[in-house]
Image: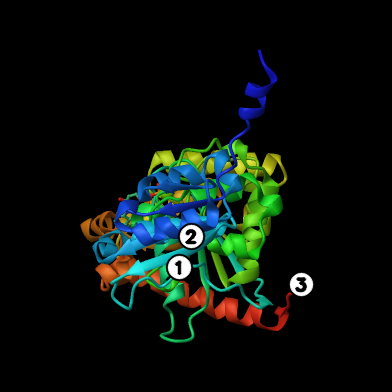
């Protein structure tokens, strides 16, 4: 083998820039510019491939992406927005080259602004003790009620889906599950306020959501420290942090239970809920965890006039030796439909009895939160 061949087989230069577009051939001036500036060190991706590429190790050399769009891309806006968010979250600069796009488009979607004070937000966790008892419905609607409690001066609310495998917050708010969530959770040590905030999605300009990861995560892949890092970032930047917990008890259940200002457990009036509640209480007692912190929420509670039902509620509470702090009525089909359409009850079924109760709860929490949180706020030490 001669020496000269070896010299020719150099490692190709890493790709440090990429164009991202429907079809790069439509943007020939961009191709010329990239060739002039970057030589051989740039590549080209379609919108679909861009997201997949970001999650591959090869993308770590990327310094910037040039996203080219024209009027035909107005339909692809949410995809483009996601590409920009993910690039930003990975410290890749995103340039947008827009041809003949209406002036509203594209407003570059970054995360919500980082708060300049540590807000020490009120932490509210919601844990369904049996599947389908309405934990996520309560979490989503409570978060939305809080975020819209005043027209102009509503608190900043962050909703976190910690049901890492079956999380349905994104379904109930019609939001995508994002790759970036996995990245944040798998390296919380290097997460800062900015990267946390850019991982959030915004629902109707008001509510900020940390969705579950796109792929099913083993619940023990994340440690209590990871979870508390995420919650800490959320509490620093928001007035209320609502957490939808997984149904199973995991390593970090204790951490959240200890940190929460309020920990709601949803149950229904059936044997399954009663037995699960009993198990949960026993487990927490055995570990000497603060089981008395749990506020029991009876969902699909019997109506006021249902005397038989009311005495069953009384017996359930007595047999478990708990107080049922909150009863939520059955809101019937409109609740399921609102969830399927990805809108909160306040938007889809304003007068629904379930919505009214969750609205009242939000008002109470807001009143307590406002009293509690105000004097403690302090400047962030950066
Ligand atoms: N009070 C209620 N009235 C009517 N439907 C409800 C009520 N609470 C929950 N649901 C419906 O029950 C199903 C399960 O609720 P969900 O909140 O996903 O439960 P969980 O998170 O505890 O598993 C959903 O279809 C939801 O719309
Ligand atoms: Mg749920």
**Residue at 49% over, 40% down:** 276
**In what element is the residue under mark 2?**
helix
Mark 3 within 8 Å of ligand 2, using the beta carbon: no
Quadrant (top left/top right/bottom left/bottom right) for the N terminus: top right
Q: Position of residue 71 (x, y in %)?
A: 26, 66
Query: Which residue has dot 3 on it?
Result: 382
- Judge whether residue 195 can be spotted in this image: yes
**In what element is the residue under mark 3?**
loop
Q: Position of residue 380 (x, y in %)?
A: 73, 75
Q: CA distance from mark 2 to mark 3?
A: 24 Å
Q: From the viewer's perspective, is 34 left or right of 235?
A: left
Residue extending farthest bottom: 152
Whether 81 is drawn above or below 256: the answer is below
**Closer to us: mark 2 or mark 3?**
2
**Residue 294 quadrant:** bottom right
Query: Which residue has dot 2 on it?
Result: 85
**Residue at 41% over, 43% down:** 131
Which one is earlier in the sequence, the residue at label 2 or at label 3?
2
Q: Estimate how packed mark 3 is, as few (under 14), some (14 to 19) or many (20 or more) residues with alpha carbons within 10 Å.
A: few
**Residue at 34% over, 57% down:** 28
């Amino acid at each position: 083998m001669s020496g000269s061949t070896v010299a020719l087989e150099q490692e190709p230069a890493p790709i440090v820039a990429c164009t991202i577009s429907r079809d790069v051939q439509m943007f020939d001036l961009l191709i010329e510019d990239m060739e002039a500036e970057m030589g051989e060190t740039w590549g080209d991706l379609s919108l679909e491939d861009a997201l997949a590429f970001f999650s591959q190790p090869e993308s770590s050399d990327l310094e910037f992406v040039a996203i080219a769009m024209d009027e035909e891309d107005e339909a692809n806006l949410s995809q483009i927005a996601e590409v920009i968010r993910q690039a930003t979250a990975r410290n890749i600069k995103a340039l947008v080259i827009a041809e003949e796009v209406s002036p509203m488009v594209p407003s570059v979607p970054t995360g919500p602004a980082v708060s300049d004070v540590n807000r020490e937000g009120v932490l509210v966790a919601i844990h369904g003790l049996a599947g389908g008892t309405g934990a996520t419905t309560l979490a989503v609607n409570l978060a939305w009620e809080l975020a819209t409690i005043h027209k102009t001066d509503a608190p900043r609310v962050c909703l976190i889906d910690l049901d890492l495998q079956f999380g349905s917050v994104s379904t109930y708010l019609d939001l995508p599950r994002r790759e970036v969530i996995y990245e944040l959770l798998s390296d919380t040590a290097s997460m800062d306020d900015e990267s946390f905030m850019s991982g959030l999605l915004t629902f109707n300009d008001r509510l900020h959501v940390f969705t579950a990861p796109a792929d099913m995560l083993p619940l023990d892949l994340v440690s209590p420290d990871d979870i508390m890092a995420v919650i800490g970032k959320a509490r620093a930047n928001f007035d209320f942090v609502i957490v939808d917990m997984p149904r199973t008890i995991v390593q970090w259940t204790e951490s959240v239970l200890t940190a929460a200002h309020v920990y709601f457990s949803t149950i229904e009036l059936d044997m399954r809920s009663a037995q699960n509640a009993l198990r949960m209480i026993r487990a927490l007692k055995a570990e000497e965890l603060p089981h008395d912190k749990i506020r029991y929420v009876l969902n699909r509670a019997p109506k006021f006039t249902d005397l038989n039902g009311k005495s069953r509620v009384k017996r359930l509470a007595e047999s478990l030796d708990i107080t049922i702090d909150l009863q939520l009525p059955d809101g019937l089909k409109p609740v399921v439909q609102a969830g399927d359409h990805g809108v909160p009850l306040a938007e889809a079924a304003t007068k629904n009895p379930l919505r009214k109760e969750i609205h009242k709860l939000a008002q109470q929490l807001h009143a307590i939160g406002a009293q509690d949180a105000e004097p403690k706020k302090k400047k962030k030490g950066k």
